[in-house]
Amino acid sequence: ETPTFKFNGKIYTTYQEMVNAKRKRNQDVLEASGLLKPPQPPLYTSHVTSNNKRNKNKQAQLKAPLQQPSRRSSRLSQSDKPNYKEVSTFIEHQAAVVKKRPRTTSTESRIVSPTLAAAPAPPAANSVRSINIDTKALVLGEKGVLGQMMDHTGKEFVINESFSLAAHPDDQKRLAASRLSFNKYCGVQEFQNSIFLWINLGSKDNPVVNDFLDDARQVSWFGGSRMHDESPVIHKLLKMGQQHDEKEVSSDKPHSDIILWCRRYQTDTKKFTPYVCFGRLTYHSHVPQSHPLKFIWNLVDYDGLKNHSDKAVRERFAAFTT
């Protein structure tokens, strides 16, 4: 028996015919009620159409005559118009100066003019550079350290020991509870009125070799890699090393505020000894424009070390200098 489908009083032989009849019924109901409206045009044009309009607008702008900008500010409208030609002329002049500037070699770039040498920044409150040291008392005083080896290794112990033994009373009071600030990597340490020179002896890793000369009456010292003839600390060394105390002008042992500290590398322990104070230094000579700068210094307290009443000091001085 063939299946039949019934809808709205009518019989359909297939299911699809019944569905089509329902759709037509729904369509007729919507049209009769006025709910079925004709299709509306699209709200937006296609992407291609909008791009074409945009291109046409750009072309119209390019063809339009250029307009001079108008000043809206009343204050600016009363002022003279800027001369942009002068600005462009100045820029061209500066470019010409740069082109004419000669090129320098790497060696020339290391030579700094005295007028370009930067002055050192003012020291911090706890900086060693702000401290005054009585160098004569430190070396030759009742608790003088001439020829003495420090109890501990490192520069910090030397700095603190010198501060406690010979710093000005005002500085000791001002910095009693402060940790002193200094550069432990530099071979020279400035104080307010004096300088410490640090020397390593016997180290194989040093690019330069410090040595004692003239039966240890003199010693060589090399400046750091960044030091040059116009470095402020080099000027200070030259000034201090060549000036004598006015009270000792006639003396064969002039006073100096440059103090030498040495330590020796021990091959058996592969460590450095604590620093030893070898007294004051005066200037003998140096090699200008050398890199690193090489100095020769005179040991002011050579006789005091060589003929010291303490046998340990005499032997230590001999061991370090031979």
Image (cartoon, rainbow, N blue to C red):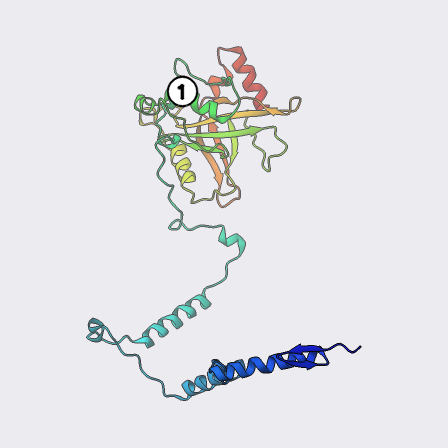
> At which x and y percent is residue 264?
58, 25
Q: Residue under circle 1?
A: 138
Q: Is residue 81 left or right of residue 322?
A: left
Left or right? Give the position of 201 relative to 147.
Answer: right
Residue 10, compared with residue 90, is above or below; it is below
Between 231 and 24, the one nearer to me in the picture: 24
In the picture, measured across the screen, residue 244 lies left or right of residue 229, that is left
Residue at 50% across, 54% down: 108
Q: Quadrant of residue 95?
A: bottom left
Where is 315 relative to 204, above or below?
above
Tell which of 37 and 308 is nearer to you: 37
Percent coordinates x, y for residue 92 in the rendering:
40, 72
Residue 256 vs residue 166, the one in the foreground:
166
Point out the image quarter for the N terminus.
bottom right
On the question of residue 279 being in view, the answer is no
Residue at the front extreme of this rendering = 9
The image shows residue 113, relative to residue 39, as above or below, that is above
- Looking at the figure, which quarter contains the C terminus? top right
**Residue 190 seen by the camera:** yes
Q: Dot 1 lies on which element?
A: helix
Query: Which quadrant would residue 144 be assigned to in this image?
Result: top left
Residue 191 x, y percent position in the rendering: 38, 30
Question: Picture coordinates of residue 170 (x, y %)?
Answer: 30, 23
**Type of the residue with mark 1:** Leu
Q: Nearer the viewer, residue 176 or 284?
A: 176
Using a 10 Å C-alpha cutoff, classify the residue at mark 1 as few (fewer than 14 neighbours), some (14 to 19) or many (20 or more): many
